[in-house]
């Protein structure tokens, strides 16, 4: 497992997520608002909103907070108009990175990220998306099925790839097949933990201990920025290096 997904798993093992809870709520709320604005307010007919509401439930967001985020989509008195922006560039150690943001001020977000990349020894503005594939990703908890059962079901549903581990099952699809595969698997295993379009590196760069520590710290800093929704990177950290960093 590489890049963003691996980093997320590391951070969960480290614990201390309570400090980030308010920020996570704000990001999910922003995603709910944008999803509801771009499509129908009914999650049954809006896959992106449906995925955002699942994230809200997993984060234990209250119904009132979720409802307020949906109502903001009407624009009535909110004063907020979020734009989706993607930034590409090189992070520490030459790692290729894609940062997806939702912002109500493009200039502020671009300036902030440019400064962050520069201070970390990297730079935004270089096209790196060719080192990633646009895919659909559907995730289920490990306990919903064993690896063989999930693999068989995913293949039948039209998925491209399946992996399983301690963190659960990850099913990869073509972008246009995401909703079809998700629906087929949910009919058998229940609601997915996540189902969305992502950037998956097609070539990863192994990091030594020193570089891994720097890159992980930088991705954490990006993830903490209010406007940043997702961070993807093409690095790979071995179990041996992880053990030295967090063991």
Image: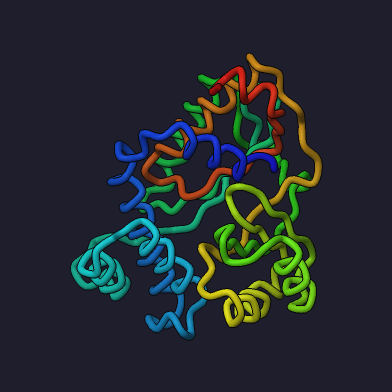
Residue 76: image quadrant is bottom left
Pick whichever, 124 or 213, lies toward us: 213
**Residue visible at 43% across and 53% down?**
102
Is there any visible trace of residue 88 in the rendered image? no
Residue 97 is situated, as x and y percent measured from the top left of the image, at 64, 38
Residue 210 is situated, as x and y percent measured from the top left of the image, at 63, 14
Pick whichever, 13 or 52, lies toward us: 13
For this view, does 71 lie left or right of residue 41? left
Quadrant containing the N terminus is top right
Q: How is the image coloured?
A: rainbow
**Residue visible at 72% across and 69% down?**
149
Residue 52 is situated, as x and y percent measured from the top left of the image, at 43, 66
Is there any visible trace of residue 70 in the rendered image? yes
**Residue visible at 41% across and 35% down?**
15
Is the residue 129 above or below the residue 126 in the image?
below
**Residue visible at 66% across and 72% down?**
178
Is the residue 191 above or below the residue 93 in the image?
below
| Count of numbered tags | 0
* Residue found at the far top of this picture: 210
Residue 69 is situated, as x and y percent measured from the top left of the image, at 28, 66
Quadrant containing the C terminus is top right
């Amino acid at each position: 497992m590489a890049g963003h997904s691996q980093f997320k798993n590391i951070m969960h093992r480290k614990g201390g997520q309570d400090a980030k809870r308010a920020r996570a709520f704000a990001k999910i709320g922003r995603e709910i608002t944008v999803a509801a604005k771009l499509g129908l307010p009914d999650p049954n007919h809006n896959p992106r909103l449906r995925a955002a509401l699942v994230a809200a439930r997993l984060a234990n967001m209250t119904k009132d907070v979720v409802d307020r985020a949906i109502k903001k989509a009407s624009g009535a008195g909110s004063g907020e108009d979020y734009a989706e922006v993607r930034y590409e560039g090189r992070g520490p150690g030459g790692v290729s990175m894609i940062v997806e943001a939702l912002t109500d001020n493009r200039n502020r977000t671009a300036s902030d990220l440019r400064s962050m990349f520069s201070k970390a020894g990297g730079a935004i503005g270089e096209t790196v998306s060719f080192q990633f594939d646009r895919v659909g990703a559907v995730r289920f908890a490990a306990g919903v099925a064993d690896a063989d059962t999930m693999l068989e079901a995913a293949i039948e549903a039209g998925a491209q790839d399946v992996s399983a581990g301690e963190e659960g099952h990850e099913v990869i699809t073509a972008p246009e097949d995401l909703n079809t595969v998700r629906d087929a698997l949910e009919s058998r295993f229940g609601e997915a933990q996540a189902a969305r379009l992502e950037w998956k590196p097609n070539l990863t760069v192994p990091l030594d201990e020193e570089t891994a520590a720097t890159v992980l710290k930088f991705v954490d800093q990006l993830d903490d920025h209010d406007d940043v929704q997702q961070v993807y990177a093409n690095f790979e950290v071995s179990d041996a290096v992880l053990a030295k960093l967090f063991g």
